[in-house]
Image (tube, rainbow, N blue to C red):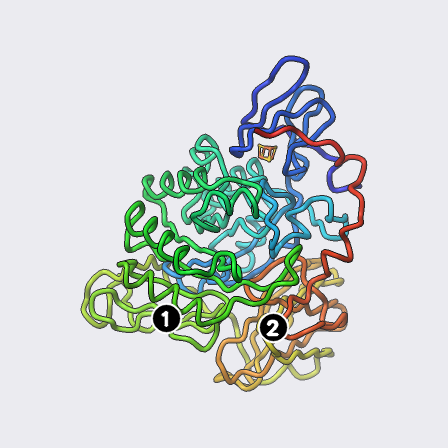
Amino acid sequence: MNWKDDPHPARLFDELPDGVVRCRLSPRNCRIRPGQHGFCMVRANQDGRLVTLNYGRSVHATEETIETEAVFHYAPGEPILSMGNIGCMLNCDYCHNWKTSQARFVSDDDVVTYTPDEVVDIAKRHGIRVLSWTYNDPVVWHEFVTETAALGREAGLVNLFKSAFFISPEAVEELLPVIDIFSISVKSMDPRYYRRLTKGWLEPVLDGARQVHRAGRHVEISTLMVTDLSDDEDTARAVARFVGEELDPGVPLHFVRFHPDYKMTDSRRTPLERLHHARRVALDMGVQHVYLGNVYDTEATTTTCHHCGHVQVTRYGLNARIVGVDGAGRCAGCGEPSGLTLLPPRPPRPSLAELPAGERLRTASFVWHGDVRSLHIQVRNDADAPRTLYQRRSGSDSEGTWTALALSPAESYRFIAAKATPGEQGVEVAVPDDVRCSLHEVFDRAHFPTVEVADGTLNDDVSPLPSYRSMAGRRPSPALQGEGTTP
Ligand code: SF4
């Protein structure tokens, strides 16, 4: 079945004359004629009713860490279950997730179907306590996100919403009862930048951030510093002013390094000195915690106490260690509240010094190189009995220790292995004969799609994703032709 062939009733729309509907999910308010779809390509008019085409349609659920989502002050180092979908209410020229955010590039091979119960069940089975609604953009997955997040909450899970947040106030109100953490990407403070590069507009994003902060939810703000476009001091000042004056100086701010992608492969990585300068500017303006993303071997990812400077959390890439906060969330240096939200300690995964004797296992290994410092490991248990896979790191503190991961019969699972120390060289995986395994390079923070290691990397410093230019000539499928009008 084609991924868009099972429409689901949508909420938040008005019925207009002549069978036209107006979608109220994002500020775009698309007016959609019968048989057509909105700008996001995943909400359509079917016989005068608004339907969502991507309900339950997802990229593969993936275990990552909360640092992947530019969330540093809520449960540092916590595993999350990342759920991405199809479509977006924006179309940024440099999108790092363009092959799923722009629905016309999505093929059925990229899509996995989940029910709300299945998502919660995966998290519970693997001891994951945070559901992360992420990647392309969860705004356009509204019905599935709100229903599943509510179910997850009933099961004791925390919900994280990582978004560009081009969303209507009405939709935000529906998220507030079920979402605990908002990680909001403010791409620039220049309205012209939004119009030109994202095809959206700025003010609703800022209004949404104000709205969730006013409601008392955990908020962190990130800005992708696009080379020569938004990596300047003025942008840093304007974002810092918004965070410090309109939200709170204690709200963490992340300046994130850009890599060339989508329609902007003729650009270059953000120069490191511009990122460090932006951080210094924001700190000097009084924002208490300013971090750099996609930057390694730096103090700019360490959390220190705002009062006494004591180191509270150290990080390397997507890994974190809480080193200076007590169980009540107080600084180990001065006893003041750290501002970090912590979850109760979680039991570690089983580990063993040697692989089990007598078990037939195949191994695969990967060496970190360039800025490819994370790997998605995808496994499928083809047996009708439980199986266990093992992974270990080479060149790390835990050299030689294998960590075990249990798989249910017929289960497909995907998880991240991210370089955890400067000296770590790579990762090794051992799987039983009846478990399929593939390794996928991840460049910078996690994204979809990824490229199988077997397909090779073009360049250590350029995204190993399929090139947009190679797919740009592809025509949208007939079901996706025709688009609603936007103001
Ligand atoms: S872009 Fe999509 S979500 Fe936004 S108003 Fe249009 S149809 Fe609705």
Determine contact: label 1, label 2, CB under 8 Å.
no
Of 353 and 271, nearer the camera is 271
Ligand 1: quadrant of the figure: top right
The quarter of the displayed image where residue 333 is located: bottom left
Q: How far from the left and from the top, in percent, is residue 479?
A: 78, 35
Q: Is residue 73 visible?
A: yes
Say which residue appears at 74% left-offset and 73% top-offset: 456
Say which residue appears at 44% left-offset and 48% top-offset: 156
Circle 1: element type: loop
Q: CA distance from mark 1 to mark 2?
A: 21 Å
- Which numbered disc, 1 or 2, marks the residue that appears first in the sequence? 1
* Left or right: residue 108 compared with residue 426: right
Residue type at numbered disc 2: Val
Say which residue appears at 54% left-offset and 75% top-offset: 419
Q: Which residue is mark 2?
A: 372
Q: Which residue is mark 1?
A: 302
Q: Is residue 157 visible?
A: no
